Image (cartoon, rainbow, N blue to C red):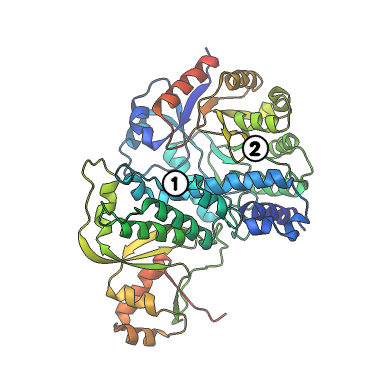
Amino acid sequence: MSDREIQDSVIRALADAPYRASPEWRGLALADPARLERFARFLARHFYHERLVHFFKYSRALARVTGRRPEAVLHSAGFDALLSTAVLGSRATARAVAALAVNHVRPADGAQPIPYLNDLLEYEQAMMVVEAGPRVWRDAGKGEGGRGKGAPPELVEGTVLLDLAYDLPTVLPKLLQPWTEVPQAAPLRVKLLIARSPHGRVTVARADAAVASVVELADGRKTLPELAREAGLRSEDLDATLAGLADLGAVRFATGS
Amino acid sequence: MSDISVGAFYNPHLGAELARATGIDHLAMADPPASHDPHWPAIKQRYTLLLHDYLGQLSEPLDERSIARARSLAELYRTPWVAEHFQCLHTEDGRYNINYVFPPLYTEEFLRRFVTNAKALQARLDQPLVMENIPGFFDVKASQLSEPVWLRRFFETTGAGFLLDLPHVWLEAHYRAMQPAAWLAEFPLDRVVELHVAGVAEDDDLQGPWIAPAAPSDEMLDFMGLAVSRCPRAQAVTFDAFSPSLTPEVLLSSVERIRGAL
């Protein structure tokens, strides 16, 4: 085992609670288990504090109306219960932590002082989950991300298409400005695509009908002509849509390998 | 009167206060300025800015994208030096990331890695590189050298400057049940270019003190005075607090107390 591999095992032990409990890790006897556990718990709270503050910043701005700050869940029994299974950066743990925040902010009695709150929480939760997952930290210089000529496009794992009942994009910036009356969102069906680049940059874009069709149909098996036919798009429109989606990190092109 | 530059971190939520503050010589930049930050033009015009962003972990070579970003930020800030950390916080395959400063193993292999990659970065920068020490909360049994010895060898081989984070040294001494001054004396203080000073706070998970965006205690300021007296090449002391929870009162009074203690 190289020193780099040992370092990786320590990093994994700090990030991955099931690994930390495994005989594989314990057998290495690299660190005092109690101290490592304390540090891992500290890291978990820090890791998800940063993400809740960032991704739930809009419902955080509404806390003076809802009375609920999303990051308060980090000191709840629910979060403590997650710690024994948490894997920092995984989609499963992101989903579980985001769900705690959503349940905390959403009124328990069904009273809804902010009509678009459910949409907002769904959006924030989706943002946090999409951001999760392994990422490319260093470019390998092998030209990854290139588009195979005519290769079947497939939706990148984790990409989300949201179907909302309120026009959230117009109200989000207003929530972060000073306000006295809660900014309102117009009732309007809006589809939003949330995708992440290989380097971890999360992007949100309004999705038109063409985007929505391609996102739903791109499975890595359908050829471009099949996709164009099923989506009802001309070839040049499909190319433009796919180029935009690839730039966002929403689709990639299957290589067959 | 000391001629050491005294500063703080640029906290964008305190932009208005920092734009009109007096008694601050420099600001360290942990993040690039937001495009909509109304105070950035005044901040940029007024202060010496120190690049202190996450550029990458030097256990691996920085890729071209990271180097280009470092160069671009250094040019934007007109920084006198570029800072990075002795850290290794994500696995080589990118699968696990703890998103928090974490030291490498202090081994010969990691020393070679950091030296090689720091030299490669130095060759691409127009400014000197300084490297900051990172505290360990627990020892990893695979380490072969003490942290101070490992750091000294790194600095001797690369010629890089040392960004000495004093709370990090203080915390390590605390968890080793050592006197902070005794632990400090083992570090290569002749290489120090900049010092970081801040407070510490109790953490429930760690069941002890840890890094916090808090005002330095009198004990920490005394420790800073001792450290500066032993760092003949020190040029700057920075109040190391970067957090949305930081208030202008804590930032401004901490800088004032640091200046008073020098």
The quarter holding residue A25 reads bottom right
State which chain disc 2 sits on: B
Give percent across and percent down for residue B177.
73, 29
Q: Residue at x 28, y 47 (%)?
A: A175
> In the rendered image, is residue B119 in sight?
no
Mark sitting on residue A71: 1
> In the rendered image, is residue A91 in sight?
yes
Q: Residues within 10 Å of mark 2 (few under 14, many from 20)?
A: many
**Residue topped by disc 2:** B135
User: Is B236 in front, or is B183?
Assistant: B183
Q: Residues within 10 Å of mark 1 (few under 14, many from 20)?
A: many
Residue type marked 1: Glu
Q: Residue at x 46, y 50 (%)?
A: A51
The residues bearing labels 2 and 1 have C-alpha atoms spaced at a distance of 26 Å
Residue A58 to residue B9: above or below: below
User: Is A53 in front, or is B78?
Assistant: A53
Give percent across and percent down for residue B87.
62, 45
State which chain disc 1 sits on: A
Query: Which residue is most to the top?
Result: B1
SS at circle 2: loop
Residue type marked 2: Pro
Q: Residue at x 47, y 36 (%)?
A: B242
SS at circle 1: helix
The quarter holding residue B33 reads top left
Give percent across and percent down for residue A22.
71, 59
Image quarter of the N terminus of chain A? bottom right
Q: Residue at x 27, y 54 (%)?
A: A112
State left or right for residue A3 relative to residue A85. Answer: right
Residue B133 to residue B217: above or below: below
Image quarter of the C terminus of chain A? bottom right
